[in-house]
Image: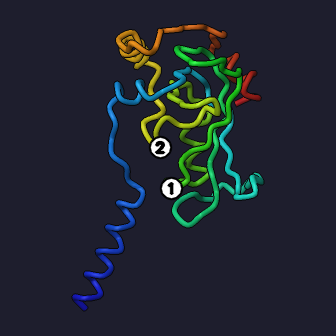
Amino acid sequence: MKRVFTSFLFFFIGNIYATSIPEMSLPELVELADHVVIGTVCKVDIVDKENEEIFDRQARTGPGLDNQIRLHIDIDEVIYSSTVVPEKLVIGLWSAWHHSLGGAKDAWEGKRQIFLLKSDSFKLVYPAYFRRNVADQPRIEAILNKLPNKRYQKRALWVLDSQQVARVCGGL
């Protein structure tokens, strides 16, 4: 019995560490970011390995599954970017996290946040900590101003109130 418990414990702990990642500080994340944008998540969906949308709210992501949750974001403001940022982005989340479509929709749809992204394909700067509260904007701008390789380039695209967000996002 003791051997079974020990085996179970090692299996359980191994799975915990398989999907955990080290924390990164905000300055580290901002330095890695090629794009810092403020946007509203208008839609959350999940796709399978063939990129076909799955509509079941119970559909999940995680190790061993080929599904990916995506955030559809309307960009409100570009704080910094190394290139032109489209008005709308679709960002795939790290598939190793255990998420359900329903849980992700409930947590993120309609939320306005800062997103830290990298590369010309606008990928997550890091599997976690890539989303920040809009209240962090002054701190992020101060970090950007201290980085010699990044010039602060605030460009407002438009500012939306909650009623306008509902119209843009299709009636959230």
- Estimate the spatial distance between the alpha carbons at disc 1 and disc 2, rounded to whole Å: 9 Å
Camera-side residue of 52 and 103: 52
Residue 27 point in image, percent of width and height: 34, 24
Give, as a three-letter code, the residue at label 1.
Ala
Q: Name the quadrant of the N terminus.
A: bottom left
The label number, if any, that marks residue 127 in the structure image:
2
Q: Which residue is mark 1?
A: 96
Residue 17 point in image, percent of width and height: 35, 60
Q: How is the image coloured?
A: rainbow
Residue 122 point in image, percent of width and height: 61, 32
Looking at the rendered structure, the secondary structure element under dot 1 is loop
Give, as a three-letter code, the residue at label 2.
Pro
Residue 126 point in image, percent of width and height: 46, 39
The label number, if any, that marks residue 74 in the structure image:
none
Looking at the rendered structure, the secondary structure element under dot 2 is loop
Camera-side residue of 21 and 42: 21
Left or right: 84 with respect to 5?
right
| Badge 2: residue crowd in 10 Å (few <14, some 14–19, many ≥20) | some
* Residue at 34%, 36% in the rendered image: 24
The first of marks 1 and 2 along the sequence is 1
Camera-side residue of 77 and 103: 77
Q: Quadrant of residue 120?
A: top right
In the displayed orientation, state which residue is furthest to the left.
Answer: 2
* Residue at 52%, 63% in the rendered image: 63
* Residue at 63%, 17% in the rendered image: 76
Q: Are marks 1 and 2 in contact (CB under 8 Å)?
A: yes
